[in-house]
Amino acid sequence: MARALIAVTAYREPAVWGVWSEPADLLPASYAQSVENAGAVPIILPSPRGGYGEAAARVLDAVDGVLVAGGADVDPGRYGAVRIASTGGARPERDAWELCLIRTAVARGTPLLGVCRGMQVMNVALGGSLIQHLPDVVGHDGHCPVVGEHGRHRVRTEPGSRLETIMGVIADVATYHHQAVDRVAPALRATAWADDGIVEGVEAIDGSWTVGVQWHPEVHAGDELFTRFVRECEI
C-alpha cells in the first residue's frame, strides 16, 4: 500500500538562515517528523494568495488527510469579536486559507487533525468562538508558563470518545497557548478538558475523523494520535 499523503499547513513569517533574511514558508520540523514516524508522507502547505476554494479542492483531490498546525492568533473578527490588547497580530491570508480548507475538508469527509491554533481555527470555521486571553479567564499562566518553551499539564478525556481511546482517561500533554475554545461549534463536541475546565479537545459530532487538540502532540506523547490519524487517512 502506498503511504498516505498528509498536507500540513505552514507559517509565513520573517526568517533568517545563512546569508538570507526574508519572508519564508516554514514549520517546526516536529510536525513533519511526527507524520513520517506514523508512516505517512508530509506535504508542507503554505497559504495561496487567493482563489482559496479552487486551491482547497485541488489540494484535497491530491492528499489523504490534512493537519492544521499551530501558529498566530486567529483574527477575532472571524468569530464576531473585538480585538483586545493581548491578541496578537492577524495573518489574514492564513486565516482565510485555513478556514476555507477546513470547511472543504469537512464537507468532503477528509480526515482532519487540528493542533493548537489548528483546533481554534477549526472551531471558528465551523461556527464557534474563542477566548482571546486565557489568563484573564482562568487567572493563571499554566497554559503558557514560560515564553518559548512548551509546558506540561494534564487533561481528562470524555469516556468513550475518540480521544479517550487514543490518550486514555487522563493524559500528560505539552502546552503552549494563550487562547482557547470558548463557544464550541455546533458540528463539534468537547471531549477533553484541562483541570481548570478549558476545552482541550474537540471531535465531530457526526463521528467523522475531524479532531482538534489544544495541546502539542508533535512535541510530547503524540505518537498514538498521529498513528490513528494516519491510519484513518489510509482507508
Image (cartoon, helix red, strand yellow):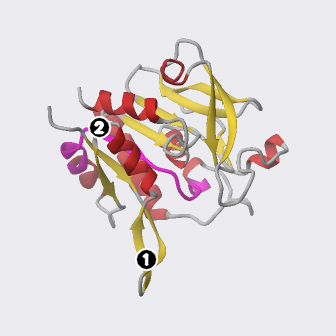
Residue 100 appears in the rendering: no
What separation in Å lies between label 2 and label 1 (alpha carbons)? Answer: 31 Å
Q: Position of residue 106 (x, y in %)?
A: 36, 34
**Element carrying mark 2:** loop
Q: Position of residue 104 (x, y in %)?
A: 32, 41
Mark 2: which amino acid?
Answer: Gly
Q: Can you tell which mark lies on residue 191? A: none
Mark 1: which amino acid?
Answer: Pro
The foreground one among 166 and 69 is 166
Image quarter of the N terminus: top left
Q: Is residue 205 left or right of residue 159?
A: left
Q: Position of residue 164 (x, y in %)?
A: 54, 19
Residue 66 falls inside the magenta stretch: yes
Neighbour tally class for label 2: few under 14, some 14-19, many 20 plus, Cα within 10 Å: some
Please identify, in this view, whether the residue under mark 2 or under mark 1 is nearer the observer. Answer: 2
**Element carrying mark 1:** strand
Residue 33 appears in the rendering: yes
Q: Which residues are magenta?
A: 58-77
Q: Position of residue 200 (x, y in %)?
A: 62, 34
Q: Residue furthest top?
A: 160
What residue is shown at x 28% (from left), y 50% (from top)? 56
The foreground one among 87 and 80 is 87
Residue 156 falls inside the magenta stretch: no
Neighbour tally class for label 1: few under 14, some 14-19, many 20 plus, Cα within 10 Å: few
Q: Is residue 15 left or right of residue 66?
A: right
Name the residue beneath numbered marker 2: 39
Q: Residue furthest bottom?
A: 19
Name the residue beneath numbered marker 1: 23
Image quarter of the C terminus: top left
